[in-house]
Image (tube, rainbow, N blue to C red):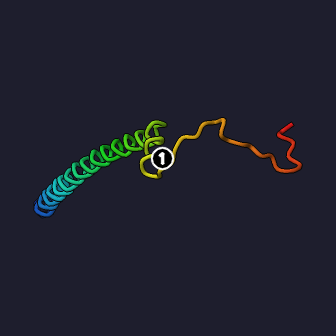
Amino acid sequence: MRRSAIVALVVIVPALLFMNVLQAYRFSRLEREIVRLERRQAALIEENKRAILAISVLTSPSRVGELASEELGLVRVNPRDITTIDPPGYGGGR
């Protein structure tokens, strides 16, 4: 009985030590992966903030008007110069 207990200890103790080292290695690897993913997430959040800012700037009415005149050569027309023509049979929503 005593001999089998010693043999069991000789087998179990190194196996437990190996499992402990393996778990420490896996934990360390996962920790590095978490740090990498957190950095990536922070970079993506910053990129998203810049994109939202660009969208808000480009969609503001004053910026749209500026781009229309500078980039496309469009000019603002006087509303009195606009003639509306209703097609035949159009009831005007009435």
Quadrant in the rendering for residue 57: top left
Q: Residues within 10 Å of mark 1 (few under 14, many from 20)?
A: some
Q: In this orientation, does residue 56 appear?
A: yes
Q: Position of residue 83 (x, y in %)?
A: 72, 43
Label 1 amino acid?
Ala
Going by the picture, which residue comes out furthest to the front? 81
Residue at screen point 27% across, 48% down: 43
Q: Position of residue 19 (x, y in %)?
A: 18, 58
The front one of 3 and 38 is 38
Secondary element type, mark 1 = helix
> Is residue 12 depicted above or below 75 in this figure?
below
The front one of 58 and 64 is 64
* Residue that mark 1 sits on: 68
Residue at screen point 65% across, 40% down: 81
Image quadrant holding the N terminus, namely bottom left
Residue at screen point 82% across, 50% down: 87
Going by the picture, which residue comes out furthest to the right? 89
> Is residue 58 depicted above or below 14 in this figure?
above
Give the side of residue 41 with respect to residue 2, left or right.
right
Image quadrant holding the C terminus, namely top right
> Is residue 15 depicted above or below 37 in this figure?
below
* Count of numbered labels shown in the rendering: 1
The front one of 49 and 73 is 73
Give the side of residue 64 with respect to residue 89, left or right.
left
Q: In this orientation, does residue 1 appear?
A: no
